[in-house]
Image: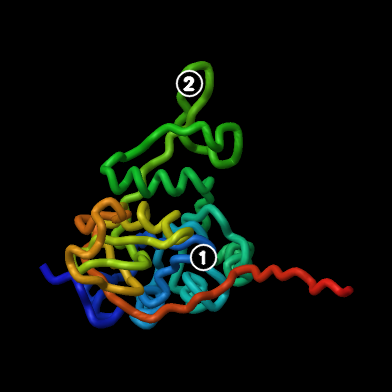
Amino acid sequence: MKKVYDTAKEALSGLLRDDMLIAAGGFGLCGIPELLLQAIKESGVKNLTFASNNAGVDDFGIGILLQTRQVKKMISSYVGENAEFMRQYLSGELELEFNPQGTLAERMRAGGCGIPGFYTKTGVGTVIAEGKEVKPWGGEDYILEEGIFADLSIVKAWKADDTGNLVFRKTARNFNPPAAMCGKICVAEVEEIVPRGSLDPDHIHLPGIYVHRIVQGAHEKRIEQRTVRQKETA
């Protein structure tokens, strides 16, 4: 089964349509599948729902799809750093399903494991619990959260072999693995494709059974918040 494609456009060929639910990896500006997002933008598909920790910034990540009005709904846990996101949400142009960060990660992981729902204490007694089933257990209340089953997953990894085994680097490992797991089809962009058998099995973060297509490319290395110390004077 061929998994390696030459370009992001080719890797997404035949997969995109309007009204899709797409799970996207990334944490802040780290581990964002930027090449695949650019290819989605250029495809012109619209009315998309994205399950992603955040929406990047105005000109990077999912933010580029907000600029072109291709996103109708975000399922997210962090909505800062993106002025266009905030503008569209406050004006009623963008729907937002807000999730606690751990809940969102577990919803993705649960979907990838075939688990339709789970109970969590996080969000009990807040607006997060509105409209959700509540069950008592051990003297405390828990709310029912549903697993996410996405039409497509797009993720970014550090290394892959041609069978789709993935290795993530540092913070990029936060949301990319669960996002990859919960899609019917997973497309991964990577910095390097290495020969089969060269990855230590104990160091593989996501097995290739979850990954259907791979593309290698060059990526930006952005810094979300630059903090520097003022030079000390004698």
Q: CA distance from mark 1 to mark 2?
A: 34 Å
**Extreme left residue here?**
1
Q: Residue at point 31% right, 54% down? A: 203
Residue at image coords 44%, 66%: 31
39 relative to 109, above or below: below
Extreme residue in the right direction: 234
Query: In which quadrant will I find the N terminus?
Result: bottom left
Asked which quadrant contains residue 185, the reply is: bottom left
**What sort of colour scheme is used for the picture?**
rainbow
Spot occupied by residue 62 in the image (x, y as percentages of width and height): 47, 70
Q: Which secondary structure, mark 2? A: strand
Mark 1 = which residue?
55
Whether residue 140 is visible to the viewer of this picture, yes or no, is yes
Residue 82 coordinates in the image, percent (x, y):
60, 68
Tell me what residue is drawn at x 56 percent, y 33 percent. Answer: 124
What amino acid is found at the position of numbered circle 1 in the picture?
Ala
Could you say where residue 32 lies in the image, as x and y percent from the top left?
Answer: 44, 68
Q: Between tags 1 and 2, which lies in front?
A: 1
Q: Amino acid at mark 2?
A: Pro
Q: Which residue is mark 2?
A: 136
- 104 in relation to 61, above or below: above
**The furthest residue to the front:** 234
Side (left or right) of 16 relative to 48 = left
Which residue is nearer to you in this view: 32 or 114?
A: 32
Q: Residue at x 43, y 32 (%)?
A: 119
Q: How far across and how far down the image is residue 3, in percent?
A: 18, 70
Give the side of residue 87 with respect to residue 233, left or right.
left
